Amino acid sequence: MNKEEILAKSRKENERCDEFQIQIRDKSMKWTYITLVVVAAIFAWIRAEQGLPMMDLCVTICSSVCVGQFYRFIKTKDKWCLIMAVITLLVGIFAVIRFLGGH
């Protein structure tokens, strides 16, 4: 093997590794979102059962998902990401208003 062949092979291997790392990061973000939503829903339910306000948890979830979706829209121009970002932004604003109102 000459120098050029070795470099080309090395680049291919590094490219596969980079794709694998990206795939792992994407899947970890998916599980992060799922865990965040499930845990917040459990705590919100517990707090609601005790008569405590729970909208702060809703704001936390909505802001997290909104930022992630806006970022994905900026990078991919996928309109579905923009729609999800706007929806979660509106729900988050509603939750802030409810939270400030004592609910």
Image (cartoon, grey):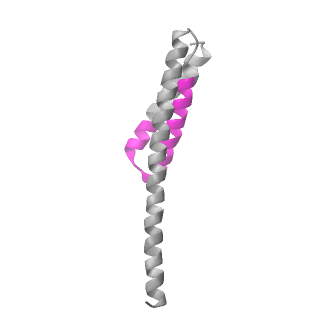
Q: Which residues are magenta?
A: 57-85
Specify whether 100 is left or right of 7.
right
List the single residue furthest toward the bottom.
Answer: 2
Rendered view: 54 above or below 79: above
- Residue at 52 percent across and 15 percent down: it is 46
Image coordinates of residue 24 in percent, x first then y, are 46, 53
- Residue at 48 percent across and 26 percent down: it is 91
- Residue at 43 percent across and 73 percent down: it is 12
Image coordinates of residue 82 in percent, x first then y, are 43, 42
Rendered view: 66 above or below 103: below
- Residue at 46 percent across and 65 percent down: it is 17
Whether 59 is among the magenta residues is yes
Q: Is residue 67 visible?
A: yes
Whether 72 is among the magenta residues is yes
List the single residue furthest toward the front.
Answer: 1
Rendered view: 23 above or below 30: below
List the single residue furthest toward the top.
Answer: 51
Q: Quadrant of residue 99?
A: top right
Image coordinates of residue 67 in percent, x first then y, are 53, 40
Q: Is residue 73 visible?
A: no
Camera-side residue: 89 or 44? 44
| Location of the N terminus (image quadrant) | bottom left
